[in-house]
Amino acid sequence: MNVDLQIAEDLQDRFEDDFAALLVPLVNGDDTLVTLHALINSWLLSLHKCVDDARLDYPLCIRLCDLSESQMLNRTYRGKDKPTNVLSFPALLDEQVVQDEMLLGDLAICWPVLVDEAAEQGKQLLHHLAHLLIHGVLHLLDYDHEVDAQARVMEALEVHILAELGVENPYS
């Protein structure tokens, strides 16, 4: 999967400090963005092994955003005037788009919310990031958790994929 990773300008200094500290054992001279990109690709590969969906081959944009951007997106597209951890925006393409131009969609992950939630829930930051990424991509693949039966399917799949990554069940 081709991943376009973006970091909000206002967030770059904080992100670099937070993330660089997490990656010390992982980085071998690479900068943090290269290492993060490699991690994200490995997480998406695990998802792809568990979910047989051709759309996982389509490009994906992941944006790590700040509180104000997350709040604006959440207000504009969901009518909720507060920042949130992850927002998923599936590509809405018309029938004229050729196969080579297909996109999976965009994810907006709010870094400050992610950091706060991980601390509050006693989770490792990278584990929570992996969970939000998997959760968001599943939304792009039309999984949902608004109805109990759908939530059980989606959460079981998340737990399974995360276990493959060595991440504990985020729902227990």
Image (tube, grey):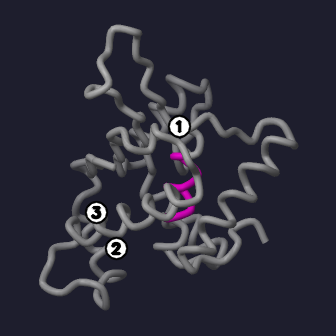
Residue 122 point in image, percent of width and height: 63, 79
Residue 157 picture quarter: bottom right
Question: Magenta segment range?
Answer: 130-137
User: Does the magenta stretch mainly form a helix, a strand or a loop?
Assistant: helix
Residue 126, image x, y percentages: 46, 73
- Residue at image mark 1: 140
Label 3, on which residue? 37
Q: CA distance from mark 2 to mark 3?
A: 16 Å
Vertical side of 32 occupied by 91: above or below: above
| Residue drawn 35% across the image and 69% down it | 39
Note whether 4 is above or below 125 in the view shown. Answer: above
Quadrant that contains the C terminus: bottom right
As helix, strand or loop, the secondary structure at mark 3 comes to helix
Image mark for residue 61? none
Q: Nearer the viewer, residue 95 or 132?
A: 95
Q: Amino acid at mark 1?
A: Leu
Q: Is residue 135 magenta?
A: yes
Looking at marks 2 and 3 on the same chain, the residue that comes earlier in the sequence is marked by 2
Spatial distance from mark 3 to mark 1, Cα to Cα? Answer: 19 Å
Q: Position of residue 117 (x, y in %)?
A: 59, 64
Of the two numbered discs 2 and 1 in the rendering, the one whose residue sits closer to the viewer:
1
- The answer to if 146 sits in the magenta stretch is no
Whichever of callouts 2 and 1 sits on the residue coming sooner in the sequence is 2
Which residue is denoted by mark 2 in the rendering? 18
Q: Residue furthest left?
A: 29
| Label 1 residue SS | helix
Identified at 51% across, 37% down, the residue is 88
Q: Earlier in the sequence, mark 3 or mark 1?
A: 3
